[in-house]
Image (cartoon, coloured by chain):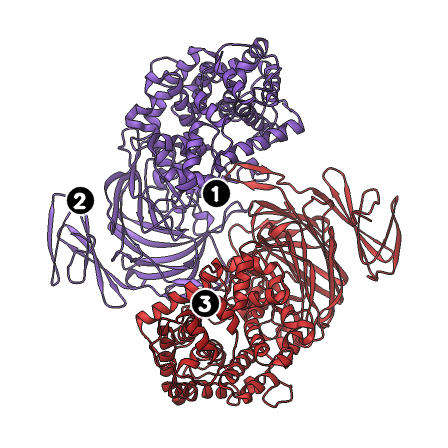
Chain colours: A purple, B red
Amino acid sequence: MNRMRRTFILVAMALSGSSLSSGAMAAPLLLSDTAARQIAGNSDLPLLFQKGLNDAKKRVATSEKTGIDVPAPKDPGGGYSHERHKVNGQIVYDAGYLYRLTGESHYRDHARDILLRYAAMYPSLPLHPERKNQSPGRLFWQALNESVWLVYAIQGYNEVRDDLTAAERKQIEDGVFRPMAEFLSTGSPEMFRKIHNHATWAAAGVGMTGYVLGDERYSDWAIDGLDGDGSSGFLAQLDQLFSPDGYYTEGPYYQRYALLPFVVFAQAIDANEPDRKIFERRDGIVAKAIAATVAMTYEGKFFPVNDAIKEKGVDTSELLYGAALGYRLTGDPVYPAIARIQGETVMTGEGLALAKAAQTNAAMPTPQSMLLRDGPQGDQGGMAILGMGKGALAQTIVAKDTGQGMGHGHFDKLSIMLYDNGHEILTDYGAARFLNVPSKQGGRYLPENDSFAQQTVAHNAPVVNEESHFAGDWKEGQKHWPTMRYTRFSDRLNAVSATIDDAYPDAVLTRTSLQFRPGAEAEPILLDVVEVDTDSAQPVDLPFWFNGQVTNLPKSLSIRTDGLTPLGVKNGYQHIWNLGDGALADGTGRLTWLTGGRFYSLHTLAPPASKLALIRAGANDPEFNLRPEMGAMVRTRGSGKTRILTVLEPHGRYDPAAETTVASEPRIADLKTVRLDGALVVQMTTKAGGTIQAVIADNPSETVRHDLRHGKLRLQWNGPVALFDGTGKRIDQPDG
Amino acid sequence: MNRMRRTFILVAMALSGSSLSSGAMAAPLLLSDTAARQIAGNSDLPLLFQKGLNDAKKRVATSEKTGIDVPAPKDPGGGYSHERHKVNGQIVYDAGYLYRLTGESHYRDHARDILLRYAAMYPSLPLHPERKNQSPGRLFWQALNESVWLVYAIQGYNEVRDDLTAAERKQIEDGVFRPMAEFLSTGSPEMFRKIHNHATWAAAGVGMTGYVLGDERYSDWAIDGLDGDGSSGFLAQLDQLFSPDGYYTEGPYYQRYALLPFVVFAQAIDANEPDRKIFERRDGIVAKAIAATVAMTYEGKFFPVNDAIKEKGVDTSELLYGAALGYRLTGDPVYPAIARIQGETVMTGEGLALAKAAQTNAAMPTPQSMLLRDGPQGDQGGMAILGMGKGALAQTIVAKDTGQGMGHGHFDKLSIMLYDNGHEILTDYGAARFLNVPSKQGGRYLPENDSFAQQTVAHNAPVVNEESHFAGDWKEGQKHWPTMRYTRFSDRLNAVSATIDDAYPDAVLTRTSLQFRPGAEAEPILLDVVEVDTDSAQPVDLPFWFNGQVTNLPKSLSIRTDGLTPLGVKNGYQHIWNLGDGALADGTGRLTWLTGGRFYSLHTLAPPASKLALIRAGANDPEFNLRPEMGAMVRTRGSGKTRILTVLEPHGRYDPAAETTVASEPRIADLKTVRLDGALVVQMTTKAGGTIQAVIADNPSETVRHDLRHGKLRLQWNGPVALFDGTGKRIDQPDG
């Protein structure tokens, strides 16, 4: 008796009557026999699990009610046939799992009937009429969508396969699964051989089809590559697409998308070929990739670097599998917390365990500071996450010092973001795109994605000569990356420093960002030092795009009241309105804004002849494709070493509902720097007269002892950064 | 034995030891003996009640820890001495109630010690150094703040008074309560005689002081006016400041503020002079005023008409008393729902009952359609609220056809707002003000409040000749108001129509707004008809300020890509950037935007030569005092009757997290009007080819039978408005 029949009989002994064939025994994919029995026999399923089950039931009920439609492929993304095929793939998946978990035969029949319709149509399908790129599909305009369809449908099919007739199985497998698996592998070799997430989706679909149909060719192609030598395929993708820290080169938005086929296929490999020890590969890279995905979030939303849709967060369906597997592999309490945000989970044993854990153990842990190195060997820059404070509302600074991240990468070397108190404060624009909105060019990336969102000036990154990094050529960018100088993480002082010498032909960019708090209860402050080293005199711009309403600006600024013009004519500048600008007296100035009931003061210390401009996105935007975001831009002209120092200080509280406002003025009153031998001293004087001195050593080695005189003080420390009070006492090491 | 001692002994029999004096028996204000005993003896207080109690305990603990500070009056609003005195008043209140409810003597001592400090300082205080307006205070820059202080402090004092020594009582009463009550009444006769909420605060403070000190002069002045003839004082305020429907002439933002002294003092009058039957006055005006305040909200936030801070909602502390008393007087289930949003309640018997109800009965009821008439006799226009749909996310349209509302009123006759799906869609700017932010002119109303926020063009209201209503003179506006032509409310069709002939010297403005749904499950649609009747040819503008990202705009618009200039030079136009404009082909055009995951299409049908402009607030705003809100403005030139017809249609869903977009295109494809004998027929044709016909009769009388031929159809109805389908079947009366 096969496993399917066992389960079936267990949960539905009195039903049946249908003509079950004994059939060939299918391979388990993500739902093990044990788990299926556990779930099917459980009348008290945890809430999150029940929610996932109920949602699937609703979707299938709707599909059963409206009837099956398998239209001829016709529309691009967002159009009817495209969306319908997506839904059908999902329904096969849902109905398959539900059949397994409830034993109700109408689920099996619905999945079967849909698949038979595809089997009748698929063999004769030419390439899709709306194909646009190099990897077209037949059912969909892109092969990618076809792979996704296969990943879902093959899972659903696997759960009903044992209980179909041999004729039905043959019809479905010969009609759709074999030809689709072959179309997506040997039929699309260029795509299938790529080291790219599109190929991972294909590998997962093709490989799982191999397990289900008992055709090892498919699973071998998928795992070891078409050529069988590991030069492509799933293992090569695992080895090359993730860094040793689990960072996916395109960034978190694509990582959560890419992750799903990795997670799903790894689980299927583990179930079918345990000897491959897939979860031990690269020191547990699958678990690390899941953990990295989750780490790159704030308040449940992904850091929107590169071509990201900002609304995307951990509640995305793609991460349901990831959270469930992450919890199985690590037991990390972050996953039950994530599951709570997700509100549901997958219909597997892992989902059940996660849902159980989420019932009692679901507080979001405090964000951890970490460096996620980029590059297969971890030597292509990285993303540093600096977290300080308590709970999910702690301050988080993100230093994006990664590699380019392919065609969806932005020209934002050394860009930073800052989150605080539950809000984005220093922002990243993300992508200029309205997903699936037909009137917005069918939901594609808009022209402004290229002309603005990807450009350097759209980021909190240094711009030299009003040009974008790598002259805006991502293929050139792909060859270079920042060097991580160091990261240091402690309770009161986090630091990251990176440098890149080839973003521009004649400029070395270095950025060092410190997150510190002068006391255990103080609010964290950002101290940011950007250095641009050029041979010839060139304009240097440093934008800080922020989210907030200005409450105070330097008096020297001349705000344009009766006419606005664009800041420039190219490289993104043409999309920026110059709201006004003015000289910074002695290179210093302070801008304060209000975000989510808290004030943020940006203190600037730049070279004497610098200017500050206030800017807003939206010029040359005839279709309103851009959001009207605001920024402040420090503008100077550098030759030799140009240093722009910034302190971003959160302070006070504005509660218009309670009518209370406190500390709307910043504490820091004065900012000075002094160059000592081998170190920069940044001296911040508070209104109350206290001083905080941050030292940044040129040589970051931990073994070098620094011992400097600064006025009457003697500053002694090891390593790249330290913090002292006005008496020379070290204050970043509470126990030191 | 006095009531205080009874309670005290009840809850703290074992404590004591302090030198309790028998003292004079105080009057109950808001906390009755019965309630105090109920609360003090209750070890299982409901959550919301416990929260209010705990918050008060925390505030007092902080005050006890940091010590008493009663600084010399020095700062204006937002400054230290101002805020400190506010806090001290609150602490006296908290400590007094806590003493009564816990019997812990340190609470009594803390209240007493604070009051003794005030008693020592107050008699010698001159007028406040920062006084600005006609009603200065001594402790505060405005008498208003002083009245508020008194309203709180006298309540706290009342709860400890019985247990102070006679000498302490004399010192406190002679030092602060008597001189303050007299300063705020006979010492500020002009202010005290006003029919204005500032005078209500004064009346409440002075009147309650009278009850506590047993001095009937004070309470009589407060209730019957300084002259004792009812020409001023609390009763005159109750009679004149609220309309018969409980609408307060300055609008909801001020109503929730004004409400507190009405509620508090009415409760105190009821407890001390029950023969006055204060809750029966004007057919229960106190209960109606509370109900109206709550009705003028969406998602818990007040409609931000007039000089409102938009963040204000029902969770404002001022409404805690209102919700508690409203529940006592009416038992309406809206109050427990409100209490849940508030998260706490007042430390009275009413608060206890409300908190108990909120434990089980707290779903927010569906908003009710209603007309709140304005004016003491209810004949000065009104605010119509049109609600349709289920739950708190139902669509709500607000027609602001009220009187001017005094100096904080805006020049927004016949303005409308629309809320849908939990979001503001057609917006009202509210006030240009950052409450208590020193860098924003000390938190005062900003110059742009006058030059923009109050002007007609800042509202969704018709503008003739680019001038504001009443030439922007509120005193002139105070003499006029719209005439409510009719309101009609039903399940599928709500309507409001109002007209005003003196907002401009040479123009009659009429607006009729219908909210309808073609079927019981359909989403409600706004159909809005603005008519401007002028003798001479004059420009007519109709702005629709909206909250959203444009996804589709008429092709005929020429969007300004490389330069923006203000729309005009005065009357608010100088603060508006013209983002671009263009002719509306045949006067028709459609703009679609996206808000909160839903699409909104604004269909326009205007005279043939009309234009549409897209606009953004922010020109001539050198300090960034304005929010950069966006709008669409229909611009035409009228002579005779100019009609601008607008349909606002919500549709579809945009969910970038789930990557699903449906129905991003509106259903309505074509809009036509036909004038028949005595009625306007608006014909809306859907993309699917169906038609909906709305008829708007010139004569709104319910008794007139209309029987018209329209093409092949015969349309028959009574009253001002009706809805028919393409076959002439009535569809706004499911049962008719």
* The quadrant where residue A256 appears: top left
Q: Give me the chain letter of mark 1.
A: A
Q: Which residue is mark 3?
A: B40
Tell me whether marks 3 and 1 sit on the same chain.
Answer: no
- What x and y, as percent, mark residue B317? 50, 66
Which residue: 27% across, 60% down?
A608
Q: Position of residue B62 (x, y in %)?
A: 34, 68
Q: What residue type is disc 1 on?
A: Glu
Please state which amino acid type lies under the numbered disc 2: Pro
Q: CA distance from mark 1 to mark 2?
A: 38 Å
Q: Secondary structure at mark 3?
A: helix
State how far apart marks 2 and 3 are (Cα). 64 Å
Is residue B434 among what the camera can see? Answer: no
In the rendered image of this protein, does residue A348 appear above or below residue B690?
above
Asked whether B466 or B258 is in front, the reply is B258
Q: Position of residue A514 (x, y in %)?
A: 26, 50
> Which residue is identified by label 1?
A311
Q: Which residue is mark 2?
A: A700
When the figure is inspected, residue A593 is found, relative to residue A152, above or below; the finding is below
2 or 3: mark nearer the eye: 3
Side of B87 where B699 appears, left or right:
right
Towards the viewer: B25 or B120: B25
Dot 1: within a 10 Å radius of its alpha carbon, few (fewer than 14), some, or many (20 or more) residues?
some
Chain designation of label 3: B
